[in-house]
Image: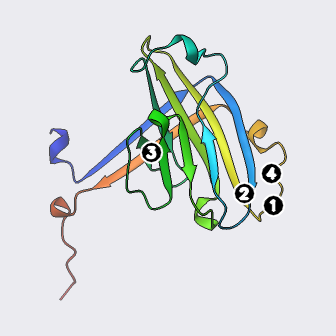
Amino acid sequence: MNLSSLSILLLVVVATLPGSQGRMVDALYDSSVNFTCDPAGLNMTTLEPGQVTRIWLLPTAEVLTAGTTGHARVDVLNDGRVLHVRSVNDEDFGVYYCVVRVFTGEYLAVRHGINVNGAYWGDLFKQYYDNLITGRILLQPSRCPSATSPN
């Protein structure tokens, strides 16, 4: 059996990444928020363009990269370094991750968060481990068995 014959593809990547605390933002409705992806311990001034790849993971589990356009809620700017959240509302609540891959094979992560008129965040990030768990389920409707009703 090969992967192309599966109806459901479940991809789970679990990685423990060294991380740095980003910003926790209590945002007002309809305001905009910018998050930057500059991990602590990485001197970005010594790296040339193309030696760093940035990937943003949204609270909705969407993955965005530099050059992503046409997203309804956010823009990825400055070669992936900046995530711009437009017109914040309840859909934007949650934790945002930026995963950086350096040409040497090193991975680093930065966490940011948006809270929209919610409970106090306090030290929420400190309560959780520095684990990044990403999961995605892809359904291929053309290959799923059709439901039949009993006669």
Q: Secondary structure at mark 4?
A: loop
**Closer to the eye: label 4 or 3:** 4
Query: Is 99 rendered above or below residue 106?
Result: below
Q: Position of residue 16 (x, y in %)?
A: 57, 26
Mark 2 belongs to which amino acid? Asn
Mark 1 belongs to which amino acid? Ala
**Quadrant of the frame with the N terminus:** top left
Are circles 2 and 1 on residues that touch, CB within 8 Å?
yes
Disc 4 to disc 2, C-alpha distance: 8 Å
First in residue order: circle 3 vs circle 2: 2
Residue visible at 56% across and 58% down?
86
Residue visible at 62% across and 62% down?
88
Query: Is 149 rendered above or below residue 49?
Result: below
Q: Position of residue 3 (x, y in %)?
A: 20, 40
Q: Which residue is mark 2?
A: 115
Disc 1 to disc 4, C-alpha distance: 6 Å
